[in-house]
Amino acid sequence: MATRPKPDAPTLDQTIQVTTRHDRSIFMFFIQMLLRPFHRHVGRPGKRQPKGSIELKPSPIGTKRCTVKHRKVCDLNVYDMESKELSTEEGKKRIYYFCGGGWQSPPSMQHWGMCSRMAQDVPGTTVSLVSYPLAPNNPAPEAFPWLMRFYREIMDRAEEVGEKVILAGDSSGGNIVLSLILEALQADDEEAMQSEIKCRPHPVAVFATCPSTDLTRNNPDIKKLEKKDPMLRFKFVKSTAEAWRGDWDPADRRVTPINANISLLAKYGIHVHGITAGHDILSPDGIIFRKKLEENGVSGQWLHWEKQMHCFVLTYPYGLREAKEAIDWVMDVLKAE
């Protein structure tokens, strides 16, 4: 039976509660050793995707215990997943999920599995998997304004029907959800300062798993940690960042949320939860982002697990203990929202 990770003892006035783990199973150790020789292939983008939002074929792991309905919002393909066993009426909660993959890959079987698990385990919840425009044919200068229109549309609709929204994503998907909400808050806050117009609706929370938070890739700890990471290399994460940002400056807050006005999340009462992993070269920037959340009074739950690889939680279908315990922790956090 999986053991729920327990949070560290909180300090006075601490708004970000961090749960830290240091253990690693033999099975996980061997999986990481086996991945090292194949790091050039594991999780790498395949063929270039066309312009626009591609239509997806739901994975069997996603449809086994969930119904999947396809719809379009602002010409983006969205796949709504609901448990076949649990009613989604009570609570009216929706999680919009943006998958990782270097901004270049459609959702994997593991992503469908994660969304299915959320729909099954979080009562009253519909999980909507978003097929967002992918780089390099849809770089941020083209895709981000489109995603912002999508964000406004889903939030206006949620307010109309009385639905609580959580934005969630892993890796590059985590980058997108953080960037979207921070940019929307910035625009709304500037508008509010000039008029008495009511603030537009926003999610109650964001959940970012091993997010990419700084596309400059200037943190020297990235290269220091590279020898421990079984999957990612500096050259790779640098190239994916360049593919997504296009001709925008890598420090632009719309692609580097670590440079945005993070205090706005606290001002508007939005929780930010997440996961970082000790053997993930994206974790140094993720930890800096988490600390900025704390410094700015943003509330949230974070899991940091040493000796774990990038997005290790997605390996839970393969029976790895750490992934099972981490995903149970994720479900507990989502249920509390």
Image (cartoon, grey):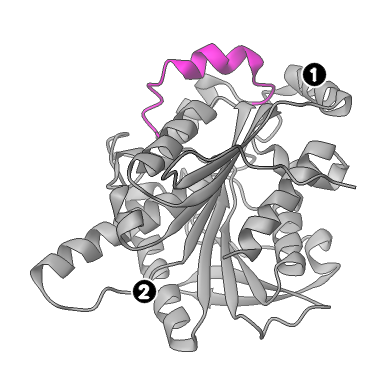
Give x and y (percent) for residue 173.
Answer: 53, 49
Distance between mark 1 and mark 2 Cα atoms = 46 Å
Mark sitting earlier along the chain (1/2) = 1
- Front position in the image: 121 or 57: 121
Label 1, secondary structure: give it: helix
State which quadrant residue 314 falls in. top right
Q: Does the stretch in magenta take in 73? A: no
Q: Residue at x 76, y 46 (%)?
A: 4
Q: Amino acid at mark 1?
A: Met
State which quadrant residue 324 falls in. top right
Q: Residues within 10 Å of mark 1 (few under 14, many from 20)?
A: few
Quadrant (top left, top right, bottom left, bottom right) of the C terminus:
bottom right
Left or right position of 288 against 259: right
State which quadrant residue 187 falls in. bottom left
Label 2, secondary structure: give it: loop
Give x and y (percent) for residue 83.
Answer: 77, 74
Q: Is residue 323 above or below residue 39?
A: below
Can residue 159 be seen at all in this image of the molecule? Answer: yes
Q: Residues within 10 Å of mark 2 (few under 14, many from 20)?
A: some
Q: Residue at x 32, y 49 (%)?
A: 141
From this viewpoint, which residue is outermost toward the right? 1
Please give the range of residues in magenta.
214-231
Give x and y (percent) for residue 31.
Answer: 82, 26
From this viewpoint, which residue is outermost toward the left? 194
Residue bearing mark 1:
33
Judged by depth in the image, the label closer to the viewer, 1 or 2, is 2
Q: Residue at x 58, y 60 (%)?
A: 97
Can residue 58 be seen at all in this image of the molecule? Answer: no
Residue bearing mark 2:
201
Q: Amino acid at mark 2?
A: Pro
